[in-house]
Image (spheres, rainbow, N blue to C red):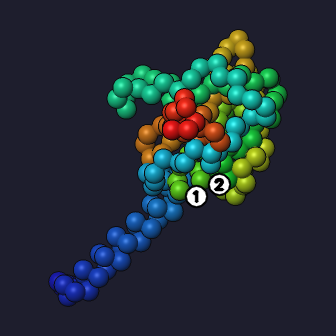
Amino acid sequence: MNRRLPTARLTAALGSGTLLLGLMVAAASAGTAGPPGSPPQAGTYRLPLDGAADVVRAFEPPPVRWAAGHRGVDLRASLGAAVVSPVSGVVTFAGTVGGRPVVTVTDAEGRRSSVEPLVPAVDVGRLIPAGTRLGTIVAEGSHCAPGTCLHWGVRVGDDYVDPLGLLPGAGPVVLLPLDPGR
């Protein structure tokens, strides 16, 4: 017996299945890939540590996406220091990557801010305001061994941006005339 669905019904069924699959993939990957969005405006983020930034190693973007570089900043920190969220968002990851404990917060525009190494104090899926305690600094996996520091990276789509450029007071340098009367 040869059962054939009319073409219109088959097309509708395939379209519905494709739509459902797309929605499932989007829901499963929410916060992990995120929309590219535009780079965040300077001043929209805060330091993930209390006090002034003590930069051990600055952001060094690679010349091409796959090349070596330093895709974040290393901030000197004491062992056990509290790490706070640099932005409001949703905790989209709290686990281990490459042997380092990492927490990632995704903001409303899909930009991901990751900090490591820290013992997480938050659960995935939690909506948090900027300044919420994410965890505490640990020595294991520190970029600054034998010392301790916090590595902070921010991704917009697949590209990393300099996290320090997102802090209040950052932004383009504006040259002013020497003579205020001009």
Q: Secondary structure at mark 2?
A: strand
Task: Look at 54% across and 29% down and name the residue there.
Answer: 178
Could you tell me residue 27's position as x and y percent?
51, 62
131 sits left or right of 14 in the view: right
Residue denoted by label 2 = 89
- Residue drawn at (24%, 80%) of the image: 11
Return the residue nearer the eye: 170 or 47.
Answer: 170
Classify residue 152 by image quadrant.
top right
Q: What residue appears at the point 67 percent right and 53 percent down from the top-left corner?
A: 88
Mark 2 and mark 1 in contact (Cβ < 8 Å)? Answer: yes
Residue nearest the observer in this picture, 165 or 161: 165
- Disc 1: which residue: 108
Relative to 79, is 111 above or below?
below
Q: Is residue 1 left or right of residue 174?
A: left
* Residue type at tag 2: Gly
Identified at 70% across, 58% down, the residue is: 127
Q: Going from the N terminus, do you reach mark 1 or mark 2 first?
A: 2
